[in-house]
Amino acid sequence: MVDTVHYALRITNCISHIRRAAGRITRRVLPLIFAMGCLSCSQQEPRADLVIANGAEPGSLDPATSKGLEELRIVMALWEGLMRVDPKTALPIPGLAERHEVSPDGKVYTFYLRANATWSTGQRITAHDFVYSWRRVLDPVTASEYAGQLFYLKNAEAYFNRTLKDPNELGVRALDDSTLRVELTNPTPFFLGLCAFQTLSVVPRDVVEKHGDDWMRVRPLPVSGPYQLERWSLNDRVRLRANPHYWDATNTHCQVVDLLPIRSASTAFNLYERGGLDIIWDKELIPSELFPILRPRSDFHSFNYLGTYFLRFNTTRKPLDDPRVRRALTMCIDKQRLVDKILKTGEVIGSHFVPPGTANCRSPEGLAFDPEGARQLLKEAGYPNGQGMRPIEYLFESVSGGGSVHSKIGVELQQMWQRELGIKVELRQMEKQVYLAAQRSLDYDVSRSTWIGDYNDPNTFLDLFRSNNGNNRTGWKNQPYDDLMDQASVLTDLDQRANLLRQAESILVRDEAPIAPLYFYSGFNYHNPDRISGIHGNVLDSHPINAIRVRKEPAR
């Protein structure tokens, strides 16, 4: 972990010894000492109103190129789109557009921007800014892995693939400064949810074009969301300050927010217990051995949400290019053992990819735990009892301090595949950003993966594995799958659409198996409800920071 955190832990331990020896330092004083001495770059810097453990160091805060959860949380605070996310329901609600109209055929949306929609510099945000921002996402030079979120626009995919050169033919244009017209290829029932997703946020054209790749370094950086970027100190924190020019600034409750790049569960939990953190977002930042003890506490908040933990197979590498090998590996995973032994927090094992509770979804059952059937498949593929098969490399991201859920699952998979199939597995862990780069470049055999729904529809999961989706990261291309997804995209009849998506998912998790679903996430965050409010369990696990309130003193 970073030097400041090591220093923090040393100070914490010293304070604990002093308290036991002298008995005069009270629990109420400890958080103040810790915050003043350990959490600031300089000892004179006051503590932020809200301090959050945010996981890995962000790789980008540009809406067009951000992709990890730790990045997208911050992006949501800095940038806004036509719609935004309701903190209670996670449904799309008006953002920079105060209202919209939809044509009778469901293919044309007209958005009307707020009169008080301005950049943090006070300049007006216009419909032309949105046209520029969306074109930028679709420009292949930007290399946005979420560009597919805009493929529902007329001519968008052709523009992204460079078979269409003229951006004026895209289905987005400004009718005037305040009015944006969007034309879709087909009716898209979840389009407003896309308009609330971070990739479709508006960015300042003048700054981006003037400074190029360094535009995020500009200070003050013109932002469109509830917070400004005051500081991004590598391996220390991202500090946000409330944006006074945000159209809904009166409802931004915390003025200064720090998000700390902590990957060690023991460090995060220790900081929280000492008062140095207000919120731990992720279950991975709580020591798993403490879950049975912590679950009854009021700090422990769990809820159902749309998230799947799964494995990606690199289908471009032998022997994983053979579906029989991929299916065999999947059928030897005792998922219930993983959940019961390692997680212990209410996760449900999954054989399909789309989580239960997703709207308008009828997922099929995938491959069941069947070691004998797996051995037969491996024999048919030419590797009886694993003979002749090279060692398989299992990739996951490292977490400082060791003992992470990812590493524990890796060890269990290693043992299962060796025991049941005779396959040797080598564990390979990397720092988060390097791990993501390895996935994107297909520099792996099998990789642990997570997907959290961007909106409440099966499409946010199944669209991921289209041949042209930047987040596919398996090398798998299947024309029947693409065709089913295309057919489903033009249907307005939800029953017919659900049946086509079921067929597509069956190809994904049964027939071809470029992925192996393991379990569905049980949502989690850790905070003191007597002190923190405004965080609501919802199906997207989306919690806008500006909606969070902090009491200065715990309730008595």
Image (spheres, rainbow, N blue to C red):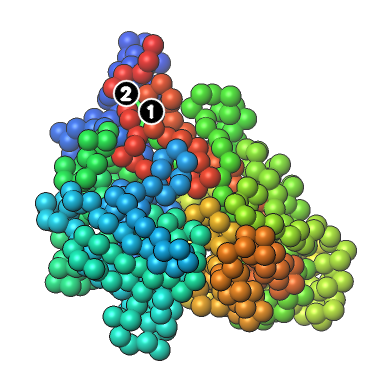
Question: What residue is at 47 percent from the left and 41 percent from the top?
Answer: 89
From the viewer's perspective, is 73 left or right of 409? left
Instruction: Report the disc number at residue 532.
Output: 1
Q: Is residue 75 left or right of residue 464?
A: left
> What residue do we see at 49% from left, 71% from top?
186
Report the residue at 60% width, 51% height from top.
358
Asked whether residue 65 appears in the rendered view, the answer is no
Q: Quadrant of residue 218?
A: bottom left
**Circle 1: residue type:** Ile
Q: Which residue is mark 2?
A: 551
Mark 2: amino acid: Arg
- Judge the density around disc 2: few (<14), some (14-19), many (≥20) Cα neighbours within 10 Å: few
- Residue 13, compared with residue 107, is above or below; it is above
Q: Secondary structure at mark 1?
A: strand
What count of labels does the image hold?
A: 2
Find residue 165 and report its horizontal and vertical position in percent: 33, 87
Q: Secondary structure at mark 2?
A: loop
Horizontal side of residue 233 vs 263, given as left or right: left
Q: How far across and down, in percent of the image, does residue 290 sit?
A: 57, 32
Q: Report the disc number at residue 441.
A: none
Q: Earlier in the sequence, mark 1 or mark 2?
A: 1
Q: Is residue 442 above or below residue 201?
A: below
Q: Considering depth in this image, is 305 or 247 the residue closer to the camera?
A: 247
Dot 1 and dot 2 residues touching (CB under 8 Å): yes
Q: Nearer the viewer, residue 119 or 106?
A: 106
| Residue 261 to residue 104: above or below | above
In the image, 508 versus 392, the foreground residue is 508
Q: Quadrant of the C terminus?
A: top left
